[in-house]
Image (cartoon, coloured by chain):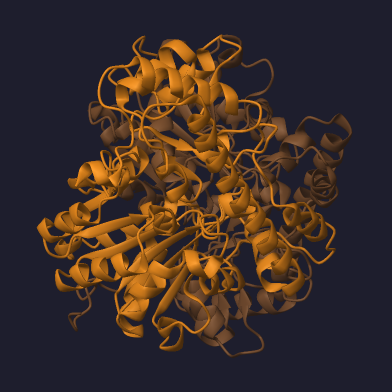
Chain colours: A orange, B brown
Amino acid sequence: MAALSLFLDVPLTREVNWLLDAYQEDPSPDKVYLDHRDCQTEMGKAWVCPTVRQTLLQIASDPTLDHEYLPVLGFPEFTRAATELALGRESRAVIENRLLLFSTLLTSSLNGALGGVSSSHENDTMKKSQGHRCVLDSLRCIFQDVGFTEIQPYHYWDTVRLAVAIEGFLEVLESAPDCSIVVLHAPEETGLTPKQWEEVARVMGRKRLFPFFDIPAQGLASGDLDRDAWALRHFVAQGFELFCAQSFSKTFGLYDERVGNLIVVARDNETLVRIRSQLQKQVMGMWATPASLGARVITTVLNNPALLNKWKQSLRMLAEKIMLIREKLKEKLRILGTPGFWDHLTAQSGTRSFTGLLSSQVAFLEKHKHIYLLGSGQVSVCSINSHNLDYVAQSINEAVSSTEGRAQGLSWAEME
Amino acid sequence: MAALSLFLDVPLTREVNWLLDAYQEDPSPDKVYLDHRDCQTEMGKAWVCPTVRQTLLQIASDPTLDHEYLPVLGFPEFTRAATELALGRESRAVIENRLLLFSTLLTSSLNGALGGVSSSHENDTMKKSQGHRCVLDSLRCIFQDVGFTEIQPYHYWDTVRLAVAIEGFLEVLESAPDCSIVVLHAPEETGLTPKQWEEVARVMGRKRLFPFFDIPAQGLASGDLDRDAWALRHFVAQGFELFCAQSFSKTFGLYDERVGNLIVVARDNETLVRIRSQLQKQVMGMWATPASLGARVITTVLNNPALLNKWKQSLRMLAEKIMLIREKLKEKLRILGTPGFWDHLTAQSGTRSFTGLLSSQVAFLEKHKHIYLLGSGQVSVCSINSHNLDYVAQSINEAVSSTEGRAQGLSWAEME
């Protein structure tokens, strides 16, 4: 045997999540992490929808349960129920049979979909990617992995006004190359109004931009599943071809089962047959067939009216809890007399929030307060709980008061 | 909206499994499918290890069960127990801390591993692939998907002698470019003797060929877990760097949970740190973290001595059943006076068997008997059961008797 390793030239890549690593290595007892990917409970555990436990037990007790391979594109019952949830029962695409449904592994839904289509190497219009929020490094990785070279981040949030920057967003769309893919991540949480979405759809339709919806938390922004799906349904109603990656991790609290659904809306059924063949080929090389237990749990809940109601109720309660945390934080900052305006905390909704903190203030929080959040100032709202609320508010107050630069959240009046 | 689909140029790819499709479309009530990927029971259902049901119920009943994301590389308890099963507790690589363990999604274990390493684009020696059984189209797809362009199938089975073709296999290895990857699929089922494996290891070591073991059915060839792992353990003991993709689908009958483990044995621990960083990056873009319930079931069984014993006993029983099917088929063909020799059916072991049928005979079976098997004559032994055994044997007899060409299974004496 030769003495040198065959892996001699394999380089070390940077750590995947330096923020979490830094938090975990911090020995301070006061440390707080504000970038959880899951919705945390008061006890700092991932929230699990109570219906999940009951349903899983019921499935495991079923003597007829087998463990055969699922079809390559997953349970038809699952993908159908999931899609109805996203598009609604009366969707034009459903009625016209222009839907391809595809059980996925979350992250992989993007990867698989992009790979499936771009691997044909004949659809050059799809090779350019315009899009996605700059905070989402993982999205960039996924697009890069499947060979996209032109990837542009965009912003829909005005960091000065601390509000949706619809004009800037429309400008980005106008200047994108025709037929670019636009990743619309968490449309339910962006805070765009229906009227603003209509404007976005008009520009995208005119420039033939391809919408790739990514829906991680339907129901957790407004507490209402239909309301949170408004943007997606509007695009479908307008006749767009699109992809929609749908996740159930947050809404069921089932993070460890990787249950997702990819919805492909195409112009006609003949087109879908060709897309399906590409996706199947891609899936065969990646994971062959999806895992089943998580999808079984979700299918059971979605198809049982009593369980469905219980689940919807849990979602509403979780959405209300999230809004309450936003309100409490805003109130604490008001009482502390923190410079700036903080109405944007409650003007937004959903699991993630722009705080409006500057990167220097974020650095202050990490260095002096052992509080870890993204440099953009975005936090996971559920990472704040009754145990750390006072400390977080007090620390934000200190960060804003002590760092140089403008005060937070100039009011609209000051901006005009 | 423009009228033309953006997917206008996406081509239709050929169907993924034309054999299964042809079988499913065949309206004949006599039809038999002999290429199941799973181990079938007498009732034509996928065999499930009885321990699985009990363990899954126990896990679902656990009130402390949470559903948080698993670590990117999976449960440490799972990967450790799985690796001990493959390498043994006393493995040199374990003792010397030269192992990286990595919970995977089966197919993806290959894809992830190859992607992780080849994505560095600095390890050119790894970019050439030599190997894998030609019947395994899916392996070819996986290697192609991650950018391997030189892929050569090899044979270790002599279709004339109907026995292991060790000389031919060694010649292939000798003529392979140095540092090629050699996929050693299902070594437990190839029928190579320890002495032959030693010879294979010697050639591969001299030419610095990289072994990528793929172990889908440890324990199902001989009924003994240790004996079936002999080849892998020999390579590790010889100091090879290697990858080993380990699957639990067949051995637990848990096909729908996609539980796999990738074992990376490297020269030293420092090398592993670099490989781990590449694999983590790859996983983050593909499936982020693995699904958990299947891995929890297997971990529980492997770490509980009573359950472990029950599982080992089930494996032995299944292995014995497989050997019994082989013996029955051979006996039926003998009674029918089928031309040729059929000892190779019982000289092989494990879930898959070369029948020695010629492609013309395979075509005869499909066309006239509605029996579907691979063109190479390979079958899944468990696809034969008491309901179809007589029909299959009778049909093989007719195929061999009526088609032109040489009789099957020339005896060794005739060959010399």
Q: Eyeballing the image, is A266 above or below A178? A: below
- Comparing A91 with B58, the one in front is A91
Side (left or right) of B185 relative to B381: left
Identified at 63% across, 58% down, the residue is A316
Please identify the residue farthest to the right as the structure is shown: B306
Identified at 34% across, 45% down, the residue is A139
Q: Eyeballing the image, is B387 above or below B412? A: below
- Comparing A160 with B144, the one in front is A160
Residue B409 in which image quadrant: bottom right
Residue B266 visible? no
Residue B226 in which image quadrant: top right
- Comparing A320 with B280, the one in front is A320
Residue A159 in which image quadrant: top left
The image shows residue A193 at horizontal and vertical percentages of 36, 63
Side (left or right) of B153 relative to B311: left
Residue A353 visible? yes
Q: Eyeballing the image, is A250 above or below B392? A: above
The image shows residue A257 at horizontal and vertical percentages of 61, 49
The image shows residue B339 at horizontal and vertical percentages of 60, 71
Identified at 70% across, 32% down, the residue is A43
The image shows residue A58 at horizontal and vertical percentages of 82, 60
Counting labels gives 0
Q: Which quarter of the rendered picture does the N terminus of chain B lie within? A: bottom left
